[in-house]
Image (cartoon, rainbow, N blue to C red):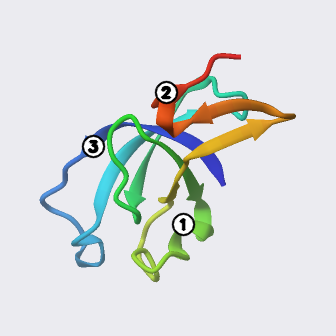
Amino acid sequence: MLFGKITGTVVSTMKDKKLEGLRFLLVQVVDPDGKLMPQYVVAADSVGAGIDETVLFATGSSARQTEKTDNKPVDAVIMAIVDTWDVNGKTIYDKSKSDLITV
């Protein structure tokens, strides 16, 4: 699993039948220290995430393990919305403060 921040949406009206009903979001990768990285991935949303939320996402064959993506041709899925995360006793992210905390 990887940390990411939702930075946008992807709309596709024409897609494979197996992808119908899935919502796609643009996720910017976040390192474990809370730093936004210059990497992005388009991921299927299985949890109802929104813009600017911090999420956990998976790529590869693991992306097809959620209820919404089971047996579908996806390579990335958002499977959790992060409430908080700490590293070595220091809070890196707290959703109630609605942003990454700089370290």
Looking at the rendered structure, the secondary structure element under dot 1 is helix
Kindly identify the residue that appears in the image at 62 percent across and 43 percent down. 84
Kindly identify the residue that appears in the image at 28 percent across and 59 percent down. 23
Image disc number at residue 9? 3
Which amino acid type is marked by label 2? Asp
Task: Give the mark, 1 or 3, whose residue is nearer the N terminus.
Answer: 3
State the CA–CA distance, disc 1 to disc 3: 18 Å
Image disc number at residue 63? 1
Quick check: can you spot residue 100?
yes
Q: Position of residue 37 (x, y in %)?
A: 59, 25
Which of pointers 2 and 3 indicates the residue nearer the eye?
2
The residue labelled by disc 2 is: 99
State the CA–CA distance, disc 1 to disc 2: 26 Å
State the CA–CA distance, disc 2 to disc 3: 19 Å
Which amino acid type is marked by label 3? Thr
Task: Give the mark, 1 or 2, whose residue is nearer the N terminus.
Answer: 1
Name the image quarter holding residue 17: bottom left
Q: Do the residues labelled 1 and 3 touch (CB within 8 Å)?
A: no
Name the image quarter holding residue 38: top right
